[in-house]
Image (tube, coloured by chain):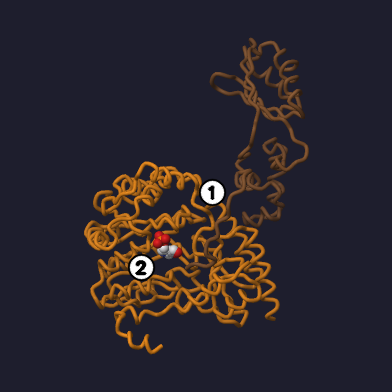
Amino acid sequence: MSDLKLHHNRVAKHISSLPKSGIRDFFDLVNSMDNVISLGIGEPDFIAPWHIREATIYALERGHTSYTSNLGLLSLREEICNYLDKNYNLDFSADSECIVTVGVSEALDLILRAIINPGDEIIYHEPCYVSYESEIRMAHGIPVVVETKEEYDFSLYPDDLRTKITPKTKAIILNFPCNPTGATLSDDQLKEIAQIAIENDLIVITDEIYSELTYDGEHTSIATLPEMKDRTVFLHGFSKAYAMTGFRIGYACGPEDLIDAMMKIHQYSMLCASILAQEAALEALINGETEMLKMKDEYCERRNVIVKGLNEIGLKCFKPKGAFYVFPNITSTGLTSVEFATQLLNKKQVAVVPGTAFGQCGEGFVRCAYAASIDDIKIALKKIQEFCDELK
Amino acid sequence: MKDKILKILGRNARLSNAQIAERLDISEQEVSETIANLENDGIIKGYKTLINEDYLSEKKVKAMIYIKINPEKDKGFDHIASRLSKFPEVVSLYLVSGEFDLILEIHEKTLKDVGVFISSKLATIDGVVSTDTHFILKKYKELGTLLTKEEKYERLKVTP
Ligand SMILES: Cc1ncc(COP(=O)(O)O)c(C=O)c1O
């Protein structure tokens, strides 16, 4: 302990002041237990499709073990731009408006570092993916939270966003379909949010990593709205739709000046994404649709089962249109999110993630990922039912 | 909805109507009516079990027979194919492009039975020009299902 004190100043202030995620302890506990049925994983339970793994092996066999250009393989960037054009009506240049990154994680880090002057405010919506707040802080920005609410199915209500804007606001981060709520935005909401961004001259960073996993209706990117392309940085990757989390591969597309700034950081800090992951991603884009749609069909079935099951138990949740998460309200049990998750784990060996892992306003909710087999989901539902009955 | 139900049954034909209904978020009645229609229309032809026969005590001798045919005037390939397909030991039969015309899969009790089938039932048919028999030594995959055991990979139980 005294040693730790002695070294107190070794770590930079903005890093030592980062909140230590309280949820780590819970994660460690889950990962140390055996025979857990998990609705806790934030990644597909599928293995990456064989043709993608096979293409990676083939790349290795042919000796593709070098660096690539900093921006990433041109063939991959071209295929990314084709894909975005075909599927989301987005028009980016492979030469100057696209950069291949080590997952959306790196892309997010790059864009934040590229645009933030110390003290700039970045608005993001909570409950949200765990990285946003700390990423903003590490880039010396000031995170400003706008809460999304259960009564609006955790959609971002434009008026709530408006109240958070100050002269220091530089950008907003959007993530729809959303981890952890599964929320999506309606066309009207998208339009209004775009209007707010234009009126206040804001950059929009849109993390659309779950866009393929949209079950009802079509996914629309905010970047396609009038006047938005020049202020939007579109982040996407292969982790979710193609079940490629471990490959660590993603990309950002946006206006040339911002991609160029991101590229500067990327070339010094990362050099380039792994060539094997890039080749795998190329294969996913060229030949991956069939397998991807099969996985999507299964997620959709699982969603229907889990939403119905949770509501029948009395853990109220709306039917999310995207991603692979549901975010039921657990206040009827009288427990906090952490109590609920910990007790459920200890008594019934079912893992869910406390809503507070995704921001303070996640209190009263837990995240259940349906990236698990229907059989496991059914067993988990039965055990959650027992757990809730025993609480009464 | 027909297509969605067929897709689900294609993956697992043992699901009950209730299970299918909850997966598609439709009523059980809609499922049972749709399936009944599919059966009546001859779109669903039956439900069978995929068995890894390595574990059965009664082993069968299996072969793929490639058949060359001189098609009959007016009747084409269909007449011979329909005759062949009536033998219960013929488990599948396809008309194919290429050097051969029909591919027939046969399951018999013994090697001798296969020989008898070829010499007395197949080769004797008018129009059968030649046959080329390939005995099946091992099956790796059937109807999309791997018959070999795959190593299970354990991922983390909780991630953000
Ligand atoms: C909303 C969101 N953004 C980004 C990521 C990280 O993605 P990647 O694997 O591409 O770094 C995740 C992963 O859980 C996520 O849920």
* Relative to A79, A47 lies left or right: right
Instruction: Tell me the residue at 30%/81% (across/down).
Output: A10
Residue A138 seen from this side: yes
Label 1 sits on what residue type?
A: Lys
Q: Residues within 10 Å of mark 2 (few under 14, many from 20)?
A: some
Q: Residues within 10 Å of mark 1 (few under 14, many from 20)?
A: few
Describe the element under mark 2 as helix, strand or loop. strand
Q: Is residue A26 above or below residue B55?
A: below
Residue A188 seen from this side: no
Tag shown at residue A294:
1
Ligand 1 lies under 8 Å from the Cβ of mark 2: no
Chain A: its colour in the image is orange
Task: Give the quarter of the figure containing the C terminus of chain A.
Answer: bottom right
* Relative to A169, B82 lies left or right: right
Ligand 1: give its quadrant: bottom left
Residue B137 x, y percent position in the rendering: 64, 32
Label 2 sits on what residue type?
A: Ile
Residue A169 x, y percent position in the rendering: 28, 74
Distance in Å between CA atoms under marks 2 and 1: 30 Å
Q: Is residue B91 above or below residue B78?
A: below
Describe the element under mark 1 as helix, strand or loop. helix
Chain B: its colour in the image is brown
In front: A122, or B148?
Answer: B148
